[in-house]
Amino acid sequence: GDVLPFAVELLTRTTYRPTCGHAHCRIDLEAGCIEGQNDSLQVYRAVLSASPTAWSRLVKLARLLIDQAPCDLLLNETDPSLDLVQGTLWQAKKSRRLGLRCIDTPEHAFRLISRQCLWQIAANRPIIVMPKGDTVEGVHQMRVGVRRLRSAINLFRPLLKPVPAQRCADRLKELAGKRVGLLDN
C-alpha cells in the first residue's frame, strides 16, 4: 500500500545570518503547526546552528536572544511530532534513566545530569500551559526536575562558576516556590 506520514509539519522558516561576531552562526525562525491524525500542535521556535569552531559564539548568541525574548530551551531530546502521533504529547514526562558508567570527568557528569533535568522541566511545560492531559502529574514532574537540578547544582557547586551557579540556584528556588492555581485548592 501507500506510505503515509504519521505527522506533517506545516512551517514557514526565515533564516538569518547574524553579524557582530556571530558570522559562523545561523538562526532559523519557524512558525506553524504539526498535524497528526487526531491532534495538532502550534509551533514557534528558533533553531540556532553554528560551525563546530563557533560553539562559544552560539552560546553567547542564545543568551542574547533569551534576554530579548524569553523562550523555552529545547534540547532536541524528543520530537513533538512523535509524541503527537503516539498520543503522549499531553502525558507527564518522567525523568529517563541516565547512563553514567562511561563518564570520565565530574564536569561531564554534571552536563548529562543537568541536561536531563532541563529536559524533564521543558517536556512537562506544554501540559501546564495548555491543560489537556494530567496537569497535576505534569506539575509534579516539572517540580521533580527543578528539585533535581537544584540538587545537582549544589552537589557540583565546587566545579561551577560561583556567580552564575548562585543566580541559577536562586531562580530555581523561586520557581520551586511558585504555586499553580490548580493545586491551590
Image (spheres, grey):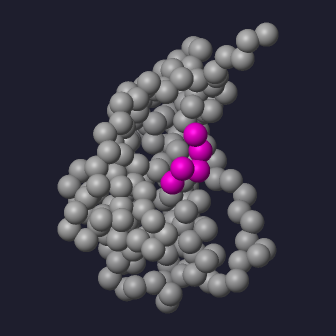
Q: Quadrant of the N terminus?
A: top right
Left or right: residue 28 compared with residue 38 = left
Is residue 145 covered in magenta? no
**Please, is residue 179 above or below residue 53 in the view?**
above
Of all residues, the one furthest to the top in this rendering is 1
Q: Is residue 169 visible?
A: no
Q: Is residue 97 left or right of residue 20?
A: right
Expressed as whole percent of the image width and height from the top left, the position of residue 83 reads: 61, 33
User: What residue do we see at 46% from left, 50% from top?
Assistant: 74
Q: Main secondary structure of the magenta part?
A: loop
Rendering coords of residue 2 (x, y %): 73, 12
Whole-percent x, y for residue 126 in the image: 46, 36
Q: Is residue 109 left or right of residue 174?
A: right
| x 20%, y 68%: residue | 20
Residue 109's place in the image compared with 141, above or below, is below
Seen at 51% across and 20% down, the residue is 35
Residue 148 sits above or below residue 74 on the image: below
Measured as percent of width and height from the top left, residue 143 is found at 50, 53
Q: Residue at x 50, y 58 (%)?
A: 118
Query: Residue 76 magenta-drawn?
Result: yes
Farthest bottom residue?
158
In this figure, what is the number of numbered marks? Answer: 0
Q: Quadrant of the C terminus?
A: top left
- In the picture, residue 172 is in which quadrant? bottom left
Task: Note whether residue 24 is visible.
Answer: yes
Closer-to-camera residue (140/82): 82
Instruction: Say above or below: 69 vs 40.
Output: below
Q: Which residues are magenta?
A: 75-79
